[in-house]
Amino acid sequence: MAILGLILLLVGVVFGIPILTTVGVILLVAGGILMLLGAVGRPLGGRSHYY
């Protein structure tokens, strides 16, 4: 999710598409939070890792 967010963010900035930039930032933040929670061993939604 974080990788997809980063890709969408970069595409949105390069091509000047604001909706892709917004969605990219949201996915990047959500993916980062899920990776952080998985890394500290806190399962979220029954899963300890999100790939």
Image (cartoon, rainbow, N blue to C red):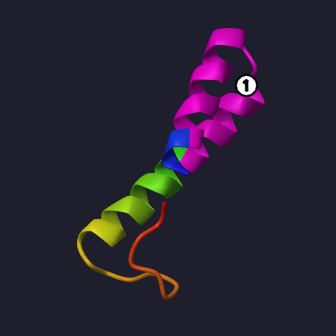
Percent from the top left, x then y, of residue 50?
A: 47, 66
Residue 21's image quarter? Answer: top right
Residue 38: image quadrant is bottom left
Q: Which residue is mark 1?
A: 18
| Residue stretch rendered in magenta on the structure | 4-27
Q: Residue furthest bottom?
A: 46
- Decide: few, some or many residues near mark 1? Use Cα within 10 Å; few <14, some 14-19, many ≥20: few
Q: Residue at x 72, y 31 (%)?
A: 20
Residue 34 part of the magenta segment: no
Q: Is residue 37 above or below residue 8?
A: below
Task: Find the residue positioned furthest to the front.
Answer: 51
Secondary structure of the residue carrying tag 1 is helix
**Residue at (23, 72) in percent of width and height:** 40
Residue 18 % position (x, y) = 73, 25
- In the picture, measured across the screen, residue 43 lies left or right of residue 14, that is left
In the rendering, at what x and y percent does residue 5 appear?
57, 40
Query: Would you identify the image quadrant in which residue 37 lies?
Result: bottom left
Query: Residue 30, image x and y in percent?
Result: 51, 57
Residue 35 located left or right of residue 30: left
In the displayed structure, 23 sits above or below 36; it is: above
Assign the magenta stretch its main secondary structure.
helix
Residue at the (43%, 64%) spot, across then down: 34
Q: Name the residue type under label 1.
A: Pro
Residue 17 lies within the magenta run: yes
